[in-house]
Amino acid sequence: SGPYEITLEEWVSLAKGMQINVRADGKYHMFEFDQEKDGKDDFVKWNKELDSEN
């Protein structure tokens, strides 16, 4: 079965706390990551600052 459309609510529930790698052929791999550790990364901090400006 191929990709299919989901609601925004389903996406938020699916993606919260997950990293999703999607390949060019549409196959994907999902895994949880440490959000607290990730939040300490300089790039993540910088990116969040940019997001808060918009």
Image (cartoon, rainbow, N blue to C red):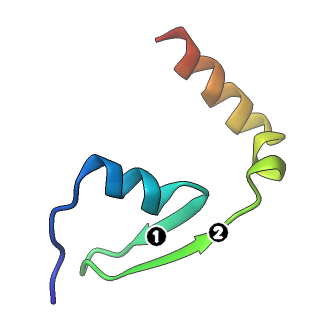
Separation of residues labelled 2 and 1 (CA atoms): 11 Å
Is residue 29 positioned above or below 22 on the image?
below
Q: In the figure, residue 26 lies in which quadrant?
A: bottom left
Quarter of the image containing the N terminus? bottom left
Return the x and y of residue 8 as percentages of the image width and height: 29, 47
**Front position in the image: 9 or 44:** 9
Is residue 31 positioned above or below 14 on the image?
below
Mark 2 surroundings: few (<14), some (14-19) or many (≥20) residues within 10 A: few
Return the x and y of residue 34 as percentages of the image width and height: 77, 59
- Label 2 vs 1, first from the N-terminus: 1
Residue 31's disc is none
- The amino acid at mark 1 is Asn
Closer mark to the observer between disc 2 and disc 1? 2
Q: In the figure, residue 17 lies in which quadrant?
A: bottom right
Q: Is residue 26 left or right of residue 52?
A: left
Q: Which residue is mark 2?
A: 32
Q: Which residue shows up at 15% across the image and 83% down it? A: 2
Q: How many marks?
A: 2
Return the x and y of residue 45 as percentages of the image width and height: 73, 30
Residue 21's disc is 1
Is residue 8 positioned above or below 20 on the image?
above
Q: Is residue 6 left or right of residue 21?
A: left
Q: Which residue shows up at 35% across the image and 75% down it? A: 23
* Farthest bottom residue in view: 1
- The amino acid at mark 2 is Glu
**Front position in the image: 16 or 41:** 16
Return the x and y of residue 22 as percentages of the image width and height: 37, 71
Q: Which residue shows up at 80% across the image and 42% down it? A: 41
**Front position in the image: 11 or 34:** 11
Q: Secondary structure at mark 2?
A: strand
Q: Which residue shows up at 59% across the image and 74% down it? A: 31
